[in-house]
Image (cartoon, rainbow, N blue to C red):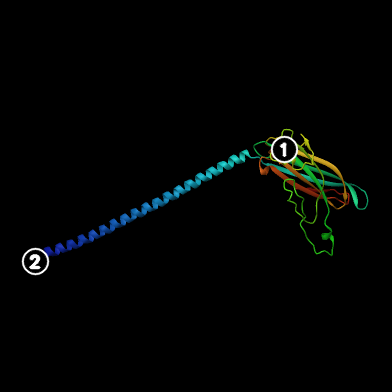
């Protein structure tokens, strides 16, 4: 009976020990499961926040793309080519000669909407290289070429090796735009008479081109420079970007060869 009792006690203690072991393992497994679930929920929350952020960024990108496409399809764009050609006709003396100047400009509507060339002013300039640069005793050995100011910004002159003197101006304005230019741009230079309904003005459909050419004579020093500044107003100056300026210059030859500046 004693042996049986000891054996029963042993079995009981062994069972109790195994039971506690299993209980501990179960508790550990439960804890790990709970921790795993907590970590899983945390990761799910993080992924949800990240996904929401990506959705917001995607929505913003789509809105910006749509706005850009609307602007692209409703804004005007143009390409242009301009040429300036100088040819000596004859010498007047050892210093001066008579020159023929030809100026051509082409503007093509590259957009999907029409635009209006409301008015333009072409300014012609004469200049020669400064004596400070050509004098071998001068400290100046290099200088930027320089360019005159445009009509839209009187302070935009780029002073350099040459100082440009404006010698002539002419222009034209669309008959429909006359009196309807925003601000005071139509009168940016009151001394320039704008020919009402003159060539190079008007409305241009997508794909259409405007071509303007002017030929004139000038008496100038051989070896000096002749320049033309094109000041063009689009769409009656409704926006700042409707004001365009382009400058070309060419050396006046002292021989019988023509000189050309094109860009």
Q: Position of residue 87 (x, y in %)?
A: 86, 46
Depth order, front residue of 263/76? 76
Q: Position of residue 42 (x, y in %)?
A: 38, 53
User: Which SS class for mark 1?
Assistant: strand
Instruction: State which mark lies toward you, 1 or 2.
Output: 1
Q: Position of residue 188 (x, y in %)?
A: 74, 42
Q: Earlier in the sequence, mark 1 or mark 2?
A: 2
Q: Quadrant of the N terminus?
A: bottom left
Q: Is residue 68 something one can see in this rendering?
A: yes
Q: Is residue 198 something one can see in this rendering?
A: no
- What residue do we see at 50% from left, 47% from top? 57
Q: Position of residue 157 (x, y in %)?
A: 75, 52
Residue at mark 2: 3
Q: Residue furthest top?
A: 176
Give me the C-alpha separation between circle 1 and circle 2.
Answer: 121 Å
Residue at mark 1: 118
Depth order, front residue of 234/8? 234
Quadrant in the rendering for residue 199: top right
- What residue do we see at 7% from left, 66% from top? 2
User: Which SS class for mark 2?
Assistant: helix
Q: In the image, is residue 20 above or below residue 121?
A: below
- What residue do we see at 79% from left, 49% from top? 249
Question: In the drawing, does residue 86 fall left or right of residue 62?
Answer: right
């Amino acid at each position: 009976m004693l042996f049986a009792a000891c054996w029963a006690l042993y079995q009981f203690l062994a069972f109790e020990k195994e039971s506690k072991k299993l209980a501990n393992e179960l508790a550990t497994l439960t804890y790990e499961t709970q921790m795993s679930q907590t970590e899983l929920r945390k990761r799910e929350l993080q992924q949800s926040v990240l996904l929401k952020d990506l959705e917001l960024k995607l929505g913003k990108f789509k809105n910006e793309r749509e706005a850009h496409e609307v602007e692209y399809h409703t804004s005007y764009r143009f390409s242009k080519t301009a040429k300036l050609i100088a040819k000596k006709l004859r010498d007047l003396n050892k210093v001066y000669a008579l020159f023929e100047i030809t100026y051509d400009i082409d503007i093509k509507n590259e957009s999907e909407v029409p635009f209006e060339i409301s008015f333009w002013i072409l300014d012609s300039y004469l200049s020669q290289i400064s004596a400070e640069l050509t004098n071998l005793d001068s400290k100046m050995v290099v200088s930027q070429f320089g360019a005159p100011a445009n009509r839209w910004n009187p302070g935009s002159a780029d002073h350099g090796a040459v100082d440009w003197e404006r010698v002539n101006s002419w222009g034209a304005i669309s008959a429909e735009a006359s009196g309807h230019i925003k601000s005071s741009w139509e009168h940016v230079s009151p001394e320039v008479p704008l020919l009402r309904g003159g060539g190079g003005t008007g409305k241009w459909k997508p794909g259409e081109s405007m071509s303007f050419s002017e030929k004139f004579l000038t008496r100038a020093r051989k070896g000096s420079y002749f320049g033309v500044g094109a000041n063009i107003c689009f769409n009656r100056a409704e926006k700042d970007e409707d004001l365009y300026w382009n400058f070309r210059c060419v050396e006046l030859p002292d021989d019988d060869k023509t000189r050309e500046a094109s860009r």
